[in-house]
Image (cartoon, rainbow, N blue to C red):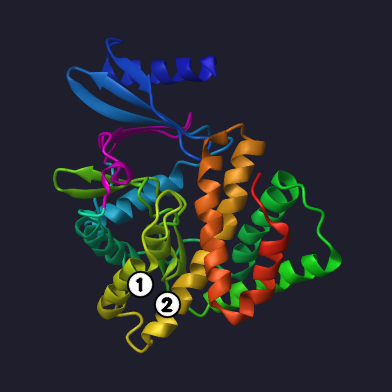
Amino acid sequence: MQQRENTLKEWLEKLIGHSMFTLIPLAGDASFRRYFRLTVNGMSRIVMDAPPEKERLEPFIKIAEILALNDVLSPEIFAINRKDGFLLLEDFGDKLLLHALNADNVNFYYSQAIDILFKIQHAWPTESFPLFNAQFIQEEISLCKHWFLQRYLSLTLTNSEEKLLIELMRWLAEQINQQPQVLIHRDYHSRNLMILDNGLGVIDFQDAMRGPLMYDLVSLLKDCYLSWPRAQVLQWLADFHRRSTDIRDWSLDEVIRAFDLCGLQRHLKVLGIFTRLYLRDNKPGYLQDLPLTLHYVRECAALYPELHSFLDFLQTRVNLP
């Protein structure tokens, strides 16, 4: 770790021309990337440290260019070190949307966030992006089985439970793949939206894919870090339905169902991700968000008859420590 920081400082010294700067570590995310705030000559920048053996810079660079072309506020890239895995970025400050949201301002901010989402969904060009296809959907859900159910809860699944989960994965993949395919951020929520003087800025977009229309919307409206009454969520969803040109021929009930099922897939994946971060990566901070994430899963399973067998499994076998 120290050797990597020395390499980073050497690169910055060459870039800046001197060593009169400060580097302050920032809170990390759910990846192997690290971030620092660089202060030099009265200016502030962000340094991304993405170890090449674990993280790739190219997706971030590519998507940042596309977002900028489509009038989405994202950090400008000032310098790139592909060999060592460093980026020098615009500093968007510390005002996460998560920390500012309340019942009085949520409509104001979510209106902006949905405006931005429409820009992302129709950004161009996106032909070369990886596809959020049936295989990928099932692989993500399998994270829940392995890390959350078997490793974290120490469940030994019966043959019938194994079959139930396999059928659930296949069915969800089939349902989700019926949605229009657009560019998806894949983590479009209150921790990845920054409050700027000129609007909301978007960060942490390097995992973008072509995927289901509802994915980013459910990430925002069924956020794993905060929740809103379902009636309010459905109102936002109805507004999205009225504005979206991709689902003009869908009924509101069809939109709600697609939204909920996309959310179920995402939240099952997140249960696996959060517990993997704890068990494998020694990052226990996300365990506090398991109850809300599991609530979303139970809520969806209760709403649709096709999921009642899965709901029975959740009620009888899944209890948080």
26 magenta-colored:
no
In the displayed structure, would residue 261 be above or below residue 72? below
Q: Mark 2 points at which residue?
A: 256
Name which residue lies at 41% across and 84% down: 253
Magenta-highlighted residues:
76-102
| The furthest residue to the left | 198
Q: Badge 2, how many Cα within 10 Å: few under 14, some, many 20+?
A: some
In the rendered image, residue 146, in percent from the top left (x then y), is placed at: 72, 52
Residue 93, quarter of the rendered image: top left
Question: Eyeballing the image, is 61 above or below 106?
Answer: above
User: Residue 269: x, y in percent?
Assistant: 58, 56
Classify the position of the N terminus by image quarter: top right
Residue type at the position of mark 1: Leu
Q: Distance between the residues labelled 1 and 2?
A: 8 Å
User: What residue is disc 1 on?
Assistant: 234
Contact check, label 1 and label 2, Cβ < 8 Å: yes
